[in-house]
DNA sequence: TAAAACAATAGACCATAGTCCATGGTTTTG
DNA sequence: CAAAACCATGGACTATGGTCTATTGTTTTA
């Protein structure tokens, strides 16, 4: 598919997709036609983009995602790939703990606010 | 305490602390001395900064943190404060789910990599 | 075939978050 | 006292992530 359809189906703008491609998060091939330089994207790219989109929302940087995609898709050194994946998993689990701390804080804040509301 | 000590004890740079103060995440009072314009920070500010620091690591923006701090510390409208806190809690829980999705993806990637390693 | 829609590229632009630097004033300390 | 350490302020600077625009070329479609 071409970038327009990919944009449509991934929910990402063309610009964002091109940015991701420039940063090595996805890749494309040349169009079948020889007369233009349109890029052709496979269905796999759509899946990758959906993952990238989730990961970006989760706060993973483009640079880190590039490492992950490399580890996953075209790693020539599996043990290195494993290292990257494990490290990222650990980091993400720590991030979850951090977020849970914040949630706990917000909960106590909520209790306080609500007890204040009760006093009316 | 003055900003140097606060920086020391919070692990944040003076610049970052000033940035946070400028953005309304913390507040300070004028120094006791009338001859300078040094700012004086209470112990509470240290606690707030530790929370802010965690929250920043967890990916919460300064703008959102300002809303949260306002809701918590000087909300004149408790029901509005409650709304802000609940909304943020929901958002954070969603973010955790997102991160868990990414972790799941990494796990499958890990399995793949490891099975590849086994084949050697 | 001509207009509309699509594509590629490059560069400008924006917001966010934070650091760094220069200047000038104030305390601390040796 | 004098130097060193500290403080405030403002502005420049960096990096990240993304959008917008202009230009030019290619398909599609009416």
Image (cartoon, coloured by chain):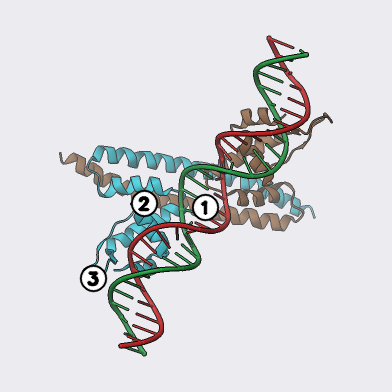
Chain colours: A cyan, B brown, C red, D green
Distance Cα–Cα, label 3 vs label 2: 26 Å
**Residue occupying image coordinates x 40% and y 64%:** A14
Q: Residue at x 35, y 54 (%)?
A: A22
Left or right: D21 with respect to A3?
right
The residue wearing badge 2 is: A23
Looking at marks 3 and 2 on the same chain, the residue that comes earlier in the sequence is marked by 2
Residue A1 in picture, x, y percent from top left: 29, 68
Q: Which residue is mark 3?
A: A35
Residue B62 appears at what percent x and percent y? 60, 48
Query: Residue under circle 1?
Result: B93
- Quadrant where the image shows the C terminus of chain A: bottom right
For the residues carrying marks 1 and 2, which lies nearer the camera in this image? 2
Marks 3 & 1 on one chain:
no
Q: Nearer the viewer, residue A42 or D29?
A: D29
- Secondary structure beneath dot 3 equals loop
On the same chain: label 3 and label 2? yes
Looking at the image, is B19 positioned above or below residue B91? above
């Amino acid at each position: 598919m071409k970038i327009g359809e990919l944009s449509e189906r991934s929910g990402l703008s063309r610009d964002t997709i091109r940015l991701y491609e420039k940063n090595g998060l996805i890749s494309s091939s040349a169009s079948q036609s020889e007369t233009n330089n349109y890029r052709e994207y496979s269905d796999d790219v759509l899946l990758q983009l959906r993952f990238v989109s989730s990961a970006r929302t989760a706060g993973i940087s483009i640079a880190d995602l590039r490492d992950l995609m490399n580890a996953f898709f075209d790693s020539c050194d599996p043990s290195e790939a494993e290292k990257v994946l494990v490290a990222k998993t650990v980091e993400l689990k720590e991030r979850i703990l951090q977020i849970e701390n914040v949630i706990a804080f917000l909960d106590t804040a909520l209790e306080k606010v609500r007890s204040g509301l009760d006093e009316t």
